[in-house]
Amino acid sequence: MTDTLTIRRPDDWHVHLRDGAMLEAVAPFTARQFARAIIMPNLSPPVTSAASAAAYRERIMAALPDDSGFTPLMTCYLTDDADADDIATGHAAGIFTAAKLYPANATTNSAHGVTDVAHIMPVLERMQDIGMPLLVHGEVTDGSIDIFDREAVFIERILEKLIETLPDLKVVFEHITTEQAVRFVDGAGPNVAATITPHHLHINRNAMFTGGIRPHAYCLPVAKRELHRLALRKAATSGSAKYFLGTDSAPHEIHAKLSACGCAGIFNAPYALESYAAVFDEEGALDRLEGFASVHGPQFYGLPLNEDRVTLEGGSFTVPESLNTGGSTLVPFHADSELAWHIVQA
Ligand code: DOR
Ligand code: ZN
């Protein structure tokens, strides 16, 4: 008998959909699987106002068929000059679901990010008051800190203090990559949660150097040692409501990946749910996939659960080497490898 698994339609609580031709190329992959997604605001220029978020939301909807059923949830890119009133008004109007903290220069298009959290304290206090979640890229940018330690040092230097100062602020520690992050999230109150990507559940840092340099395995925060991957697998499949699905799918054109200074980002949107299902299956936790993918996220954000369902079926298929779509060549996560589950009813 074929194995099947039917779950509530999942949401993606962290995705980069880009803009222009790339948006048109990648948005359908996300909308195929997910009902809603938290849309990252690191465009160039970044999405820093409610007006620009509303306009971006329109462009996302225009890139999808009318009957896609997909809802983009918009975020505000915080800068040192972030305007608490505009953010609170945008949140009240249903334009902004959350705001994103990029430490300045931590990653792609983060040059306008926050240079010191002290600069945005009034905004964060306001967000705490109105119950608006803060989404955190948790890495220090201090070049003297080893790149593999930047998340752990961010916890010590910034996150612990932030949570102490604003104990009721809703915080999503995005794309966690370390056992230190798991320990921090487990030890914090119910207002602190984390997203976990499929790639950090599948690969450790060796994947970047297998037989040569592997740019398609490079993302930020960078994959860490095996012990960290195992800690993430344990957290994701634990059933804890603090952990939920966030792909951090971050497409870059193939030439931008295969370069002397290649961009950070793994494009996992095409087979994201299948990728997570493989992990939960390997961990003997398929019964917990629905919580992670479809329940914990909406509960944290205070949004209703999706009512329709997606069915996965056991039976392997090979992920294509590359996808030529909308004039872009993109290499998906798991390119040319097998995945053990596929979606039969999207
Ligand atoms: O690998 C990444 N790519 N990490 C990020 O934080 C940003 C993202 C992107 O936008 O390309
Ligand atoms: Zn991201």
Image (cartoon, helix red, strand yellow):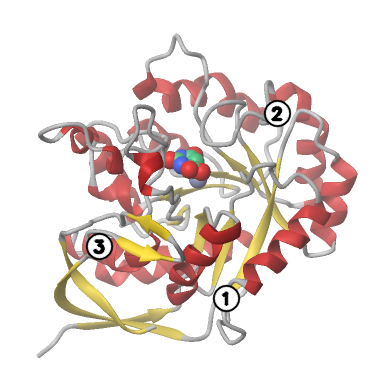
Q: Is residue 176 visible?
A: no
Residue 51's label in the rendered image is none
Residue found farthest to the front: 327
Kindly report the distance in space between the C-alpha atoms of the residues bearing marks 3 and 2.
36 Å
The quadrant of the image that shows the C terminus is bottom left
Label 2 crowd (10 A; few <14 / some 14-19 / many >=20): few
* Residue wearing tag 1: 64
* Circle 3: residue type: Phe
Kindly report the distance in space between the C-alpha atoms of the residues bearing marks 1 and 3.
30 Å
Q: Is residue 86 visible?
A: yes
Kindly report the distance in space between the C-alpha atoms of the residues bearing marks 2 and 1.
42 Å
Who is closer to the viewer here, 340 or 228?
A: 340
Instruction: Kindly tell me whether mark 3's CB lies below 8 Å from ligand 2.
Output: no
Please tell me in which quadrant of the rendered image residue 240 appears.
Answer: bottom left
Q: Are marks 3 and 2 in contact (CB under 8 Å)?
A: no
Q: Position of residue 15 (x, y in %)?
A: 51, 55
Residue drawn 29% across the image and 54% down it: 333
* Residue wearing tag 2: 165
Q: Position of residue 18 (x, y in %)?
A: 56, 54
Q: Position of residue 12 (x, y in %)?
A: 49, 62
Q: Are marks 1 and 3 in contact (CB under 8 Å)?
A: no
Instruction: Kindly tell me whether mark 1's CB lies below 8 Å from ligand 1.
Output: no
Residue drawn 85% across the image and 39% down it: 83
Q: Is residue 107 left or right of residue 331?
A: right
